[in-house]
Image: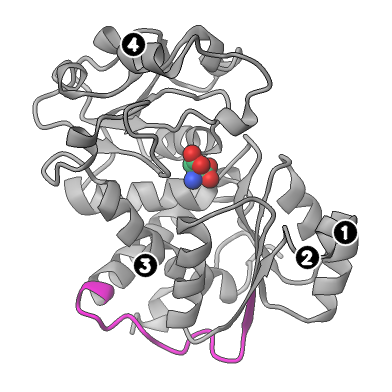
Amino acid sequence: MPNAHTISGLATRHLLSIADLHRPDIDSLLALGETYLDLSVQKDARNDILAGKTLINLFFENSTRTEKSFELAARRLGADVINMSMSTSSAAKGETLLDTATTLNAMNPDLLVIRHGASGAPALLSQKVSCAVINAGDGAHEHPTQALLDALTLRTRLGAIDGLRIAICGDILHSRVARSNVQLLNILGAEVRLIGPPTLIPQDADQWGVEVFHDMKSGLKACDVVMMLRLQLERMGGAFVPSKREYFHFYGLDQKKLDYAAPGALVMHPGPMNRGVEISSDIADDPDISLITAQVEAGVAMRMAILHALSLGGVNG
Ligand code: ASP
């Protein structure tokens, strides 16, 4: 079990955005994530740090990886877990988010994990409940725990993130993963590039501290890591790309395009993947190149670290 004396509470009570975290918080979260990852490899990660505490998973959007990984992480720390499937709950009957918050608050949870289609929903909820709130993805806004687990994956595989050249490619416009990763990777000293068609790059991206490219050949040049994103068709109100086939031709990652990157470049994808749309199967499934399974593994360990650290209480309330 990690030594409780070496872990201090975070400066924040909630995890709504990467901006909630100061560098020392990030470093200690990643160090704790590494400890839990090592312990889970030894099948020894279980402890009772959250015994007697309750975590509610409140997912208004579907999720496979994230919901299950929070559940597993919480159970491994001894917490009770309630999964609320919001498509079949009173929210589907018209209850507002704030009514839901009042109801949940009356159940006295200690941790509330929320995914919602609207940007800012977790922040709103955090003002109405008395427990710690964790953003598990809000619209196209942020997905901070994904960025942290990606950083843990990179640290585990490559040691340091400082100085890496990392390309985030594809549907940046609709991606909360991209927004959280850009912030975190910049803090950790990586050189971040965004690559995508002009229709899928946000207009203000040049103010994000990144370099923007519209073609894979120049964008991937000398990149150490290539992070592919899903084409988020469910968030597109109109036609952002001519066709999936054409999109793959220009922006889908295959061996030919990966050869533009640095020799030995590694590939990431937050999942779920659209094979043959943003990534080819031979790249996604190649264990020497792809970190995709490692990301899922790191997800449970990183979320254990986040739950553990948040349970210690925010230093600044
Ligand atoms: N699973 C990630 C998210 O929830 C990425 C995606 O859905 O494409 O944002």
Q: Is mark 2 on a helix, strand or loop?
A: loop
Question: Ligand 1 near label 3 (Cβ, under 8 Å)?
Answer: no
**Residue 32 numbered tag:** 3
- Per the model, the C-alpha gap separating discs 3 and 4 is 40 Å
Q: Does the residue labelled 1 lie within 8 Å of ligand 1?
A: no
Residue tagged 4: 250
- Regarding residue 8, the answer to whether it shows in the image is no
* Secondary structure of residue under mark 1: helix
**Residue 144 versus residue 86 in the image, above or below:** above
Q: Which of marks 2 and 4 is nearer the N terminus?
A: 2
Instruction: Indicate whether 140 appears above or below 294.
Output: above
* Residue 93, numbered label: 1
Tell me the SS state at disc 3.
Answer: helix
Mark-to-mark CA distance, 2 and 1: 7 Å
Would residue 42 be seen by someone viewing this image from the given angle? yes
Q: Look at discs 2 and 3 and give the one toward the viewer.
A: 2
- For residue 188, the mark is none
Mark whose residue sits in front, 1 or 3: 1
- Verify whether residue 37 appears in magenta: no
Mark 1 closeness class: few <14, some 14–19, many ≥20 residues within 10 Å: few
Circles 2 and 3, Cβ within 8 Å, touching? The answer is no
Type of amino acid at the residue the image marks with label 2: Ser
Q: Is mark 4 on a helix, strand or loop?
A: helix
Q: Nearer the viewer, mark 3 or mark 4?
A: 4
How far apart in space, not on screen, are marks 2 and 3 (Cα)? 35 Å
Residue at (48% x, 33% y) in the render: 178
Q: What stretch is highlighted in magenta?
A: 40-55
